[in-house]
Image (cartoon, rainbow, N blue to C red):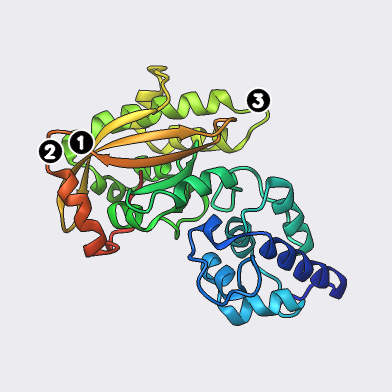
């Protein structure tokens, strides 16, 4: 168990309290409720939003307990709608290195989180330009599976698509060739948009060229195209094939995307998507957008 300096822990607790006090429940999709003494969030509400125990979060605000993990800091930053500068400050107060822009702990713009929060009846999630899922709403988990458990290169669905056969169970086999081409073209566009000093995308491409003959053959064709909107057929373990429109909203720098899924016209997908709330989260986790 690692403990930080008392001064930093005291400042971390004070900073968390100050950020909690400025957020209204409605800002994060929570009801105001009766007998609320302060306009901000309660401690137990922040704990709930961050996936932490109430006791642990109370310790953090009191300036006690163990050093929070990178994942916990990222979750707190999202729960409290921190700006990028505030998120970096929180990492430094916790004596953790500020993460690079990619990966599971990447900072999500508060505006994207707000939009995601306002789509409770639509499967939606935020991903990076390398198809690392950062956050999903409940219906996205129900449709696509929980993607929060992947780490390292496997966090990218594109990496899993070309290295793990189980990842392809999300789509009917007849759609695999189309999906492969789209993923490669999108990855080329995303990599070109990044800074010339970027190593994350370059390392991913280098690995896939070495381990996947399919990826190498498609990469040699030099197709380039961002995935802005698609019509997809998704295989669900209980509902069968659900045909949806997948729409994308890009962040200003192109590094993150809000994806949301609507029923395709002329299909029974609207009724199937309505069943998601009843069926709950599916057990399949080897999936992706």
**Percent position of residue 246, x then y:** 32, 36
From this viewpoint, is residue 279 visible? Answer: yes
Front: mark 3 or 2: 2
Q: How many marks?
A: 3
Determine the residue located farthest toward the bottom in the rendered image.
55
Q: Is residue 61 above or below residue 212?
A: below
Distance in Å between CA atoms under marks 1 and 3:
39 Å
Q: Name the residue tied to disc 2.
A: 267
The circle drawn on residue 154 is none
- In the rendered image, the residue lying farthest to the front is 35
Q: Is residue 96 left or right of residue 287?
A: right
Crowdedness near tag 2: few (<14), some (14–19) or many (≥20) residues, C-alpha within 10 Å: few
Image side of residue 237 versus residue 186, left or right: left
> Looking at the image, is mark 1 or mark 3 earlier in the sequence?
3
Tag 2 near tag 1, CB within 8 Å: yes
In the image, what residue occupies the spot 59% across and 47% down? 110
Image side of residue 127 versus residue 242, left or right: right
What is the CA distance from the residue labelled 2 to the residue labelled 1?
6 Å
Query: What is the secondary structure assignment of the residue under circle 2?
Result: loop
x and y, in percent, of residue 96 in the image:
73, 60
Q: Read off the residue under disc 3.
A: 196
Q: Secondary structure at mark 3?
A: loop
At a point 31% along the width and 51% down the height, the residue shown is 144
* x and y percentages locating residue 145 in the rendered image: 32, 56
Label disc, if present, on residue 264 of the rendered structure: 1
């Amino acid at each position: 168990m690692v403990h930080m300096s008392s001064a930093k822990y005291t400042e971390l607790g004070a900073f968390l309290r100050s950020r909690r006090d400025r957020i209204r429940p409605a800002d994060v999709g929570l009801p105001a409720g009766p007998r609320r003494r302060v306009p901000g969030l309660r401690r137990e509400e922040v704990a709930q939003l961050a996936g932490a125990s109430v006791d642990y979060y109370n310790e953090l605000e009191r300036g006690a307990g163990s050093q929070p993990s990178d994942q916990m800091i990222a979750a707190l930053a999202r729960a409290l709608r921190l700006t990028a500068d505030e998120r970096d400050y929180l990492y430094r107060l916790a004596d953790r290195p500020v993460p690079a822009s990619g990966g599971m702990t990447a900072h999500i713009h508060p505006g994207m989180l707000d939009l995601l929060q306002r789509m409770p009846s639509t499967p939606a999630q935020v991903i990076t330009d390398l198809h690392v899922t950062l956050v999903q709403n409940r219906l996205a988990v129900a449709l696509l599976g929980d993607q929060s458990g992947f780490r390292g290169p496997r966090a990218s669905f594109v990496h899993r698509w070309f290295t793990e056969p189980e990842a392809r169970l999300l789509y009917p086999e007849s759609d695999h060739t189309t999906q492969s081409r789209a993923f490669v073209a999108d990855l080329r566009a995303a990599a070109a948009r990044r800074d010339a000093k970027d190593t994350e995308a370059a390392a991913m491409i280098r690995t896939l060229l070495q381990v996947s003959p399919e990826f190498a053959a498609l990469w040699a064709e030099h197709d380039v195209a961002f995935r802005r909107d698609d019509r997809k057929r998704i295989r669900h373990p209980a509902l069968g094939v659900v045909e949806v429109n997948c729409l994308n909203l890009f962040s200003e720098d192109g590094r993150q995307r809000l994806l949301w899924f609507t029923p395709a016209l002329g299909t029974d997908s609207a009724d199937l998507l309505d069943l998601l709330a009843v069926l709950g989260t599916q057990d399949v986790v080897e999936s992706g957008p």
